Image: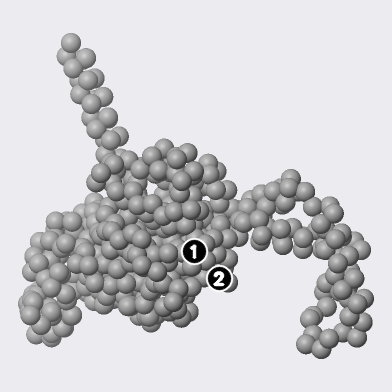
Amino acid sequence: QGGSFLIAICIGSMAEAECKAKPSGIDVARGLSQEFLTEEFFEKHWEKLPLHYRARERGESANRLPEALSVDDVMSMLRKAGPSLKMFKKGDPSDHESFMVAYLDGVSLIVNQADRTTEVLMDLCRALGKAHFLHAFCVAYLTPPGSQAVRLHTDDQDVFLLQVWGKKEWTIRNAPKPLCYTEEMLGKDTPVPKELVGDPIMEFTMEPHDILYIPRGYLHEAATGTDPSLHITVTMPTSDYCWGVQLVKHCMQHLSLNKSEPSLLRRPLSSKAPSAGDDLDKQLKDIVGSWASDVKMGSVLEAFEQRMAQTNEGQERQFARMSEIKSPPRVTEDSKVRLMHGITCLCHPRKELALFVKPDNQQMEVPAAKTAMPMLKALTHRPQLVTDLPCEDAFERVCVLQLLHQQRVVQLFAGSGSLAGG
């Protein structure tokens, strides 16, 4: 009986550990497919109408990304992003050299093709591509409190926004050009013309585990209030998938593979009308006619699937390259920190300033938001777990501590408690 009791305890402990284990990207895709990407969704909403899935009302199992993506994952993503990282403050580009300094200054951080940098997002895209869309990629949007990354605009892609942490206020408006092509997007370079902006059709707050689907062509914008926000946009480049674009690509592929390709196709257009206008008209009709007489649905689909396979192979190669990047010792949520020997910290919340005094009385002033003050006041010469230091924004906490570590104000200990290098 004693042995059975011990076995029961072990099984119970293993089950508890399994429940607490971070879900994989495949697990996240499974929840999204089972709870959100249903037959009803594809019938009523896909490329037709936006949809907000409220986890508070319907449960959290449809979006398990908050369980799968940690602050440390996001820090790693940003370090690997390189030119894929874009920074905006109130809709305008930012030129900060450090993404951590930028975030603390109220700058929104956007990582294009975030799936290339993070295993859980890559697995999510693989699974969704295989089950539903042939190809998908992710974009990460990290927004500090009181900020807006981009202004009102439309996209040429269908997107699923998975809220990871914090909150964000959303407004969805009309679709001036439903199912728009890339060249028909609005609000990217210049504001959307007022005459094209309709009244809001949806206004709501996204919270952790929520999902928002926006079909291409719908006007939308978002901003944070008092909370920061991280959401991952799972993107399907559907304007590239559509029949119009694929038929053009198929036509060009057909003509380029034709051994008797007309030389006209490789000649540049001229502003001067050709002398033999009627003859040129006939050549153009013959060229298009030769393709149209041979085009079949099966051949168009086959060529499309080949292009998607090549796109997925490129995605895999980029992910493999990113996976080889190694990070130096850095502040993580499971590490410990303490003030360097002899250093004291004086906080001035009203001035939003922290003053670090060294043993030789040299002083270093560090700008610090009021939200970081409780954490700075809690720093001592005794090593403390990062997550035990009080700060409402977990990402802000790691940014501040990492910057202080780089300034040799804070000493870093690895997860095992050993002193970290650097």
| Circle 2: residue type | Glu
Would residue 13 be found to the left or right of residue 254 on screen? left
Q: Residue at x 15, y 83 (%)?
A: 365
Please indicate, yes or no, whether residue 235 appears anywhere in the rendered image: no
Q: Position of residue 276 (x, y in %)?
A: 92, 82
Residue 96 falls in image quadrant: bottom left
Image quarter where the C terminus lies is bottom left
Indicate which disc, 2 or 1, sits on the residue closer to the N terminus. 2
Residue tagged by mark 1?
A: 217
| Circle 1: residue type | Gly
Residue tagged by mark 2?
A: 184
Q: Residue at x 8, y 77 (%)?
A: 349
Secondary structure beneath disc 2? helix
Q: Residue at x 22, y 67 (%)?
A: 225
Please indicate, yes or no, whether residue 291 appears anywhere in the rendered image: yes
Question: Of residues 81 and 46, which is closer to you in this image?
Answer: 46
Secondary structure beneath disc 1? loop
Report the residue that reaches farthest toward the bottom.
272
- Whether tag 2 and tag 1 are in contact, CB under 8 A, the answer is yes
Q: Position of residue 191 (x, y in %)?
A: 43, 79
Q: Please determine whether, in this image, residue 24 is positioned above or below residue 325.
A: above
Distance CA(mark 2)–CA(mark 1): 9 Å
